[in-house]
Amino acid sequence: FIKAGSELGVFVGPGRGSAAGSAVAYCIGITNIDPIKYDLLFERFLNPDRKSMPDIDTDFDDEGRQKVIDYVVKKYGRNQVAQIITYGTMAAKMSIKDVGRVLDLSLSETNELSKLVPERPGITLQRIFEAPIDGEKGLREKEGLNADEIANVLKLREIIKGDDLKAQVLREARKIEGSVRNTGVHAAGIIIAPTDLTDIVPVAVAKDADLYVTQYEGKVIEQAGVIKMDFLGLKTLTIIKNALELIRQNHGITIDIDNIPLDDAKTFELYQRGETNGTFQFESPGMQKYLRELKPDSFNDLIAMNALYRPGPLEYIPNYIARKHGKEPVTYDLPEMEEYLKDTYGITVYQEQVMLLSQKLAGFSTGDADMLRKAMGKKDRKTLDKLKPKFIEQASQKGYDVKILEKIWADWEAFASYAFNKSHSTCYAFVAYQTAYLKAHYPAEYMAAVLNNAASIEKITFFMEECRRLGIEVLGPDINESRETFTVNKKGNIRFGLAAIKGIGEGVVSVIIDERDKNGPYKDVYDFFSRINYASISRKVIENLIIAGALDSFGIKRSVYFVTDGQTNFIEQLIKYGTRMQEEKRSQQQSLFSMIDNGNGLQIPPPKVPTVEEDWTIIEQLNREKDLIGIYLSGHPLDPYRFEFENICTHQLSDLNDLTPLKGKEVVVGGLVVEARPGITKNNKPYLAVTMQDYNGTFKFNLFGKDFDQFERMFRKDWMVLVKAKIQMREFGNRNELEFKINRVMHLADVRDELLKSVQLTIPYDHIDDEFVQTLVQQVKNNPGKLSLRIALFDAENNMKVDCISRTYKIKISNDFLNFIHAYPFIHLSVA
């Protein structure tokens, strides 16, 4: 089915998991990574001691996955292919919430109880109420609970001893915990049976599955004599596929993405700068920080970082970086270990390294080596105690020092539970490298593909900012350039798709684009209205196109289209004109005269473009745009205050959606008030529910009591404000929760005058000449103000710096002054 998928034009991943260790799988095209080249082990995939069937999971592009499933259904028949059921059971928190609802415990008290359950995967009420706090099997060590979580457990133990409704809820919740609550369908698993499924397993139907669903769940289904395959949809493959098509359209180049050079300098420079937003696996801020420190220059570095950047081995990354750059010696417990640890600078990163070393040092069989890998990963003490004497004895017989062998074993036990499957890491590092290669060489096409697959408005906004950082403009929809989704125009900028506009369906987009492809671009507004198909395109659609800016290239302001002459507005006049033009054209095509004058005799006067007395304000235009597209496109209301966001704000609003990392910190945020909704509390006191928005996200908070009295007047819809606050424990209500405690609010327009005292310009001395000095002095004179001016001249070559304070001039930081600074990239501006 992988071969069939490729023939159907579906993008197939290079492999995943241990299957990449199979040379046969590589040779026949199931995987696309050479296992010999990267020291991947077949025994990690299959060995004589393995009892279960090996898994071969396959990634397909999101859109193509269903095509492959359809192929399998067609090949084997609907009665032999099924999806797998999943059983959802009641976990600790859900049990409390369900029982609380049935026993009529108030919602707030139920939530309070469930919040006392520690946020740890797999924790049970039985463990919470019965397990010891300390010791090897205690909650502190086994579940890793911290002091606050232990305190919450003790509270729960105290509550359950009582006779009130809360205690009853906890007792009943213990009884139903683990019960089946609902069924679902496995996201990726597909069963293929040798004969009719109903002869082998019980089946069911499910509302969210087109195929039958097995009534046995995944972990037991293969024992019934059927084979389970995972058909996974990977969005990254869709992005790569989309980017390659855009590159082909724009540059006429067809890239064989599976055979790009793995030593491409431009790609590694991108990784070294940490500019990995939008690429696969390497885009988190923490990973970007380590990439800048590591400065990877080989594919092996990427494989290692992909394996190390996860809880546990994360702490070894600084050692890996230090050893790569020669700041820490690379040591091996035994010289013989260098062969397998050389690529990772003496650090055990992969499970395969443990397997290979156990074979080399102690003569373990491939089966024993895989058993060791499994036992270490699962901390299976019984198996480890059985294998350790064997390892020590067999390795010491080869002449190795027992003390060193004991140390090696202890190191393995400490780290091997975190060691990662190199086969999987290699496959996914390869996909990551492909995305970085495309971003490095074709940034506009790649980012357009990323935007096409962004799942939310927040993600689109984030990636638009990344485009701007790369110097790529993201332009609004345009009737002559846009297609259905994001594309790249001839100037190398990204253009929004017409389908992004609310109320513009695929059918409408197809009609507009088909006409444009057939008869050329729309020359002007009259040409557009005389060519469009009014059977498909309604007046409302036209209004939405105008408000979204799709007709801006005709040179008419958006507000003009809505100006009336007392009876009809300009849009209605244009529709009337266009309809008459089309009727005349049809009638002329059937007349004798059209044969004489080639149809050029149409003399219908076009309506005059009206003048507008009061144009839309910037805010009004942007808000209308946002209503139709979901984001601000032709600008942002906060654009005049970018300086404040870059130099004064300490955090983005999206950072405040998780207050835990900010506990005890002072924060400064800015934004547009998008909602300020007044209300009355149950104690009959006024409050204000506020929603603020900045470039990257939103944050909601409420003003009560003194905060309401002091700050309510500063929050009005469409006002732009700066807020100073502290993240602290609540003073009232639930004192276990953090709150956003405001201590100052001011209008963004007042920030530069009220908060700033001085400005410093840091300038390299070798950029200074008479012309620059005259320009700088003129700018200072043009912007008189209250801020003291400091200039720092530095000589990087000789490590010298001179600080100067102007006694003649004080300045203000106007937007004109900032434009001057931006025109000279070597000037660094800082404020105090």
Image: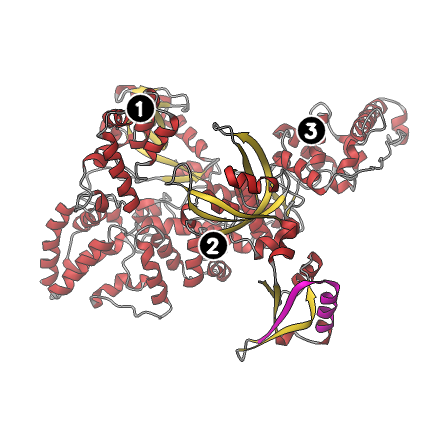
Q: Is residue 549 visible?
A: no
Of label 3 and label 2, which has the lower sequence position?
A: 2
Q: Nearer the viewer, mark 1 or mark 3?
A: 1
Q: Relative to residue 732, is residue 548 drawn left or right?
A: right
Q: Up-down: is 145 above or below 105?
A: below
Callout 2, which amino acid?
Ile
Front residue of 252/770: it is 770
Q: Relative to residue 53, is residue 539 drawn left or right?
A: right
Q: Residues within 10 Å of mark 1 (few under 14, many from 20)?
A: many
Callout 3, which amino acid?
Val
Residue picked out by circle 3: 541
Q: Nearer the viewer, mark 2 or mark 1?
A: 1
Q: How many marks?
A: 3
Q: Is residue 187 magenta?
A: no
Q: The residue tagged with tag 1: helix, strand or loop?
A: helix
Residue at left 78%, top 29%? 571
Q: Position of residue 648 (x, y in %)?
A: 56, 56
The label shown at residue 260 is 2
Residue picked out by circle 1: 99
Front residue of 37/567: it is 567
Q: Relative to residue 409, is residue 328 drawn left or right?
A: right
Callout 1, which amino acid?
Val
Front residue of 81/179: it is 179
Of label 2 and label 1, which has the lower sequence position?
A: 1
